[in-house]
Image: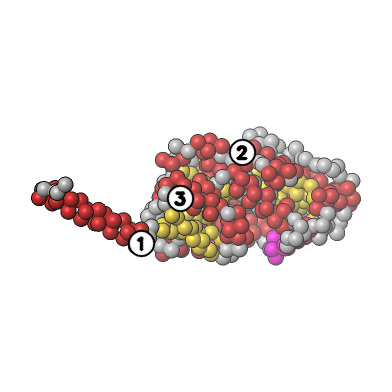
Amino acid sequence: MSLTAREKVLLACLIIVIIVLGGVAYYFATFKPKPEVIELTLYTKAGLWADFIRKTGVLESFEDRMYREKGLIVRVKIITAPHKGYRERVVTDFAAGAAGDVVWLGESEIPGLVEAGMLLDLTPYVEKWEDWGKFYEVGKKLGSYKGKVYAIPFETAPLVIYYRKDIFKQAGLPVPWQPATWDDVVRAALTIKEKVPDVIPFRGFYDVCLPIYMAGGKIYDTTDGKWIVKSDAILSAFKVYYDVFYSYGITPKEAELEKWDNRKLFQEGKLAILIDGVWCYIEKWGPGMTYEIENREDVVGYAYIPGLGTPGAPNYISVTGTYNWVINAKTKYPELAWELVKELSKPEIIAQWGYETSHIVTRSDAVLGEYAKEPFLKWATTVLEHSIPKPIASGYKKYVNTFKRVIIDYLVAEGKSPEECLSIFVNEAIKELGSDAVKEV
């Protein structure tokens, strides 16, 4: 049967369409454009920190999840800075535009970077994140500034009392030991001074402001944004320091002025009582570490830090800071950066880091795996119940450095009285912080 002219035209058109579609299909099958690869940068400390991230496979898990859930090819590049001077370096790199999309950041750097507009406000993200309710309050406070959340806490490290069980037994003191007040600590140190005279009885306080907190005081008032430079608690703190170095002589002045290595002295059994961070137990004195104590479980005891036992003082107290994950406000990919932070903040990742470094987990569901099996870490996690956060406010470093300078230069070096030191501190703090930023209570 012959085709009509119209049918021939339609057939020709159909053949042309088939040829064109086939050509297009062949083109895309042969010359398929490469999908876009999105690069995120992760900025952290070199060495232990970056190595941990690499070995956990957390970045690969994140990349796989982004492809499964969003159909995106994402690659994370690690940028590192040295551990020594990291806090200063990260601030400099933010200012220079060289910080990553996601950054490992200490709590004390948050205020300045927020004021400079360099950190992304995470409040809208955490409000929709079910896991946020599992984080301990002290960590949440340390990641917040002026009512907004800027950081997701990954680790926290409160202070505790360490004591040498062998020295305590030699001095006839009880083991285990948990002082109820500061006077109990002093009495133990004086007993050691008398009965084991070749040992340094006591060293503290790691955080120079700790005795203020032990008295029930504070150094910053969040209600008016002012630093407290004169109070009964601050005077009590100067008295604690004066007693340690002069009234009781349980710490040699040279230990402070010459910066003796407390952790090494403790390792060698030359120091009986030390207030320091929880990280020391594994990171300093653990197997294969710098100051390894071979029979650590047998000779190292630990206890909560007691209050001063005066009106208004807490029963137990500790102070802590955090290292956190933050997001650069200049990132091109805020949503993806947030997904990366969520991946990094999974409980199993936080638990593994806590176990390997003797830092305390920041979420209640992260007490698992090897972390949960380690007696010290399980105990140290309970210290958070007594812990307060360091103030997150501009001027913190100036305040602390001024307080420390008065203690070392005037109290320890010159033997000035607590009352004299308080007066000096008020004047010095006003010079450093400005009269409008301070107050007496």
Tag 3 residue: 67
Going 80% across and 44% down the picture, which residue do you hit?
Answer: 187
The disc, 3 or 1, on the residue closer to the chain's N-terminal end is 1
Q: Nearer the viewer, mark 2 or mark 1?
A: 1
Q: Nearer the viewer, residue 58 or 259?
A: 58
Tell me the crowding category of disc 1: few under 14, some 14 to 19, or many 20 or more residues within 10 angstroms, Cα based.
few
CA gap, disc 2 and disc 3: 27 Å
Tell me the crowding category of disc 3: few under 14, some 14 to 19, or many 20 or more residues within 10 angstroms, Cα based.
few
Task: Name the spot of residue 417 as percent of width and height, x first.
Answer: 66, 52
The disc, 2 or 1, on the residue closer to the chain's N-terminal end is 1
Amino acid bearing label 2: Asp
User: In the drawing, what numbered circle is on residue 365?
Assistant: 2
Q: Nearer the viewer, residue 198 or 92?
A: 92
Q: Secondary structure at mark 2?
A: helix
Magenta span: chief secondary structure: helix
Tag 1 residue: 30
